[in-house]
Image (cartoon, helix red, strand yellow):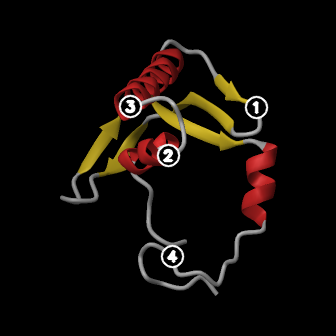
Amino acid sequence: MAGKVTKAELIEALHEGKSLNRKEIHGLIDSLFEEIKSAILSGKTVELRGFGTFEVKLRKGRKKARNPKTGAIVSVEDHGVASFRPGRELKTAAWSVNPEVESPTGNSRT
């Protein structure tokens, strides 16, 4: 996959040919992200049909985990992890993406 798309680039793409200005689009996107974040943090699942589902999953803790930076053994409590599951339409569209394209790290996926 080639590169990444920033929020500013999304705003610019939405602005082209639309009657909304950049500031309004920026506010709308920020509001959408805040609503998704507050919903999943309150235990709800956010489902956007054709795109995917956002939710917080509970990850079990462990008594013996290792800090990868220091190598020290630490205990990790149960904690939430934000997750995204792509919807059927997104999965189907992603299936046809060419794997021969360079990955963001520069390694080809062959």
- Per the model, the C-alpha gap separating discs 1 and 3 is 23 Å
The spot of residue 92 in percent (x, y) is: 81, 56
Q: How crowded is mark 1: few (under 14 residues within 10 Å), some or many (20 or more)?
A: few
Q: Mark 2 points at which residue?
A: 16
Q: Mark 3 points at which residue?
A: 26
Q: In this view, does 25 lie above or below 35?
A: below
Residue kind at label 4, given as amino acid type: Ser
Residue kind at label 2, given as amino acid type: Glu
The spot of residue 44 in percent (x, y) is: 60, 15
Res 62 quadrant in image: top left
Q: Mark 1 points at which residue?
A: 49
Q: Mark 4 points at which residue?
A: 103
Q: Which residue shows up at 51% across the image and 30% down it?
A: 19
Quadrant of the image containing the N terminus: bottom right
Instruction: Give the structural element (helix, strand or loop) at label 3.
Output: helix
Q: Residues within 10 Å of mark 4 (few under 14, many from 20)?
A: few
- Mark 1 and mark 2 lie on one chain; the one further toward the N terminus is 2
Residue 89 located left or right of residue 82: right
- Mark 3 and mark 2 lie on one chain; the one further toward the N terminus is 2
Q: Which residue shows up at 81% across the image and 45% down it?
A: 88
Q: In this view, does 85 lie above or below 103?
A: above
Residue reaching furthest to the left:
70
The spot of residue 81 in percent (x, y) is: 48, 34
Which mark is nearer the camera, 2 or 4?
2
- Per the model, the C-alpha gap separating discs 1 and 4 is 28 Å
